[in-house]
Image (cartoon, rainbow, N blue to C red):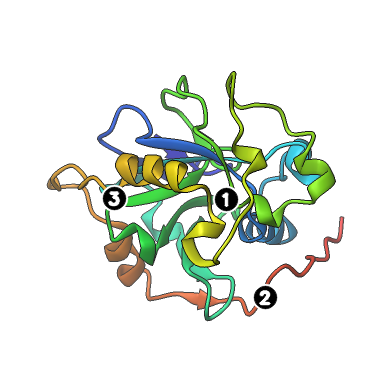
Amino acid sequence: TISCNCGQVCLSFPESAPRFRYSCLCEDCRQKAVWAFSQGGPAVPLGVMSYEKGFDTIYFGNNVTVTQGKEQLRFFKLRNDAGSTSCMAKCCKTGLMVDNAFYQGMCVLIQADIANVNTDMSEPPAFYGFTKDFPQDKLATLPELYPGDTSKDYVFANGGVQNFASSGNIKKWCDGNFVPPAPASETSTTFQNLQKEAGGVEVLDLIKGAAIKITL
């Protein structure tokens, strides 16, 4: 199950464990989490803010049951040309799940550092993604995710999906996530249907990579 910080919203997925896990270093995940915190949302982990780690990022199939708090769901994009659409809880500004056109409707992303996650997290992250967005001096000090992990050393090239990870790690991601979700039940739905029912998507018009002012 996935729940918001105050407990008013709870989501469940039929899969007993994440279908994939990696450590995300991208600037959009950071901007999104910091923006939510500036609106009263959960604090961003200190290790993430100090560039000592990436966001712990997991995926489930796009088959979700909202067990409580459906009226609290809000959908937004960082900017018009952003690839991702996020779902957050209006009550406490917790980021709950994310969709991206690249996912082809098969999966949703969850920041396990931000939402309350109750699932099997025994499988370690497969790699670091979007190393190009991380300060190079900090990138060099990131720990191995498992013995022999060299993903932080990837040098991005050619733009597009190649900025995400090496070809081998992209294949791992695709093999884990390009799997149809479990058949819908009487109570389950999809990210896209929930988005429509909530009335669409708000665009925040944030400049890519821009810092977010936080007033404490």
Amino acid at dot 3:
Asn
* Gap in angstroms between the C-alphas marked 1 and 3: 19 Å
Please name whichever residue, 108 or 134, is drawn nearer the observer in this view of the structure: 134
Quadrant where the image shows the N terminus: top left
Residue indicated by mark 3: 62
Identify whether 92 is placed above or below 18.
below
User: Which one is in front in this view, the residue at disc 2 or the one at disc 1?
Assistant: 2
**Residue 197 pos. (x, y %):** 31, 69
State the residue position of label 2: 206
Crowdedness near tag 3: few (<14), some (14–19) or many (≥20) residues, C-alpha within 10 Å: many
Question: Would residue 90 be seen by someone viewing this image from the given angle?
Answer: no
Question: Residue 52 appears in which quarter of the rendering?
Answer: top right
Element type where label 3 sits in the image: loop
Per the model, the C-alpha gap separating discs 2 and 3 is 27 Å
- The residue sitting at 63% across, 60% down in the picture is 32
Tell me which residue sits at (62%, 45%) in the image: 154
Question: In the orientation shown, which residue stands out farthest toward the right?
Answer: 216
Residues packed near mark 2 inside 10 Å, few (<14), some (14 to 19) or many (20 plus)? some
Name the residue carrying label 1: 94
From the top left corner, tell me how far across and down residue 92 is, in percent: 60, 52
Lower sequence index among marks 2 and 1: 1
Residue positioned 83% across, 61% down in the render: 214
What is the secondary structure assignment of the residue under circle 1? loop
Dot 1 surroundings within 10 Å: few (below 14), some, or many (20 or more)? many
Q: Is residue 150 above or below residue 30?
A: above
Q: CA distance from mark 2 to mark 1?
A: 18 Å
In screen coordinates, is 165 left or right of 207?
A: left
Which quarter of the figure has residue 15?
Answer: top left
Which mark sits nearer the N-terminus, 1 or 3? 3
